[in-house]
Amino acid sequence: MQRFCKQLPATARAFAHSRPITTKSGSWMEGKLADDTNYVHSGVSPDERTGALLTPLFLSTTFVQESVEKYLEKGYSYSRTNNPTVSTLEAKLAVLENGYGAACFGTGMAATTSAICATMVAGDHCVISDCSYGGTNRSCREFFSHLGMSFSFVDFRDPEIVRKAMKPNTKLVFSETPANPVLTLTDIQAVSDIAHAGGAKHVVDATFATPVMVRPLDWGADMVIQSLTKYYEGHNMMTGGALISKDKEMHARVKFMQNVHGNIINPFAAFMVLQTSKTMALRVRQQSHNAMAISEFLEKHPKVTKVCYPGLASHPQKALADKYHRDGIHGGMLWFEILGGVEAGKKLMNVCQRPWSLCENLGATESIITACAVMTHANMLKEDRLKVGITDGFIRVSCGIEDKEDLIRALSIALDQI
Ligand code: PLP
């Protein structure tokens, strides 16, 4: 932190921790709450003035101060810096991810670029997974590298490879687990130890996992990225992102930078995610259940050559999945390839009927198939894409919450047409 500014400006200090709206209406019983209760209630209290059960949507840009002397007494001045609806969501995320504080952004990519800006300056080096979301890969290759930062893209399946890629100027180790779209896993604990031994921070993009499956901060990571656009929001309605920090200093840094950059989530999206995140654990369980059933169906199908799902015994990192994925939940994402390669894969995606939809995005109630090579990962270099296994016929599946038999029947009909 000292490398950026000797002392944080007053605004950053004042907003070092998001303040939820608090109320006297209703008090909580003593003791720790279970996760399922936290998904519904954490960070949120009934509105003190009206008793509204849901945190109101505050669309005010500015907040009137009691006096010059009592400036910031209520915690809010201007909605770019902090907004009560947004702060409530941030407080909720901090609890769910077990962090010190959260900052919410307009998109997941804004959270990713902010994580890089918060940990690196020109001359610094980052060890990053060679398999991550295409937009993350592009931001490093085509944007941050032009600002004088350097990146080593390596295979995170083996922590030793990460260790060997560390340099004296490595300030950030960036992993994604399970990785989009190939579903490789990172040993978060081992990689966090390697990062810390080299004086670097470990940031984990856990968008595919959600805290329902993995909480990276519990395993030694310093920051977690969530594209709220995916499972947290879960209904294909809003974009959003979050950066959850383990300690106060990093959180203050992120909030300061967010106020500088202005890349905040809008209060309406925050209001929506406050509601949708209440059902996230239920949705993720159903999505995982569907993904397991669909993977088992595909694995037995004679036209399918390859299926990858962390819940399958055939997943090359099944032991790691069992170590990190809580309660046997392995997520709603899987991928497969079929006989006939690229052309057959493309045909399958074109003929597959509803309830499946051919589009981008993932983690929502609707089941989605995606042709990663031309859609989500089109901006990766072709040789890099093929190296990590994203072939032109690669079919990524995001399971929704529909009935698994309907999803399997639609896939079966599509496979019969190939
Ligand atoms: N991280 C992962 C793993 C993603 O899959 C995505 C988008 O697909 C992002 C980050 C970026 O999120 P957003 O689209 O909200 O900017």
Image (cartoon, rainbow, N blue to C red):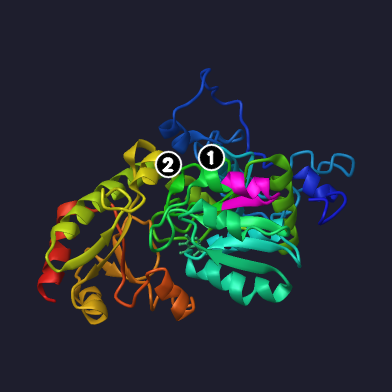
Spot the residue most to the top.
30
Question: Dot 2, how many residues are within 10 Å of its Cα: few (below 14), some (14-19), or many (20+)?
Answer: many
Q: For the residue marked with disc 2, what is the amino acid?
A: Tyr
Q: Is residue 397 magenta?
A: no
Q: From where the camera sits, is residue 262 visible?
A: no
Q: From where the camera sits, is residue 288 visible?
A: yes
Q: Nearer the viewer, residue 15 or 147?
A: 147
The residue under label 1 is 219
Q: Is residue 201 magenta?
A: yes
Task: Answer above or below: position of 16 versus 174.
Answer: above
Q: Residue at x 24, y 53 (%)?
A: 402
> Which disc number belongs to residue 324?
2
Image coordinates for residue 287, horizontal then vertical, percent: 30, 50
Q: Residue at x 52, y 52 (%)?
A: 159
Q: Residue at x 41, y 43 (%)?
A: 213
Q: Is residue 23 left or right of residue 212?
A: right
Image coordinates for residue 310, horizontal then vertical, percent: 33, 51
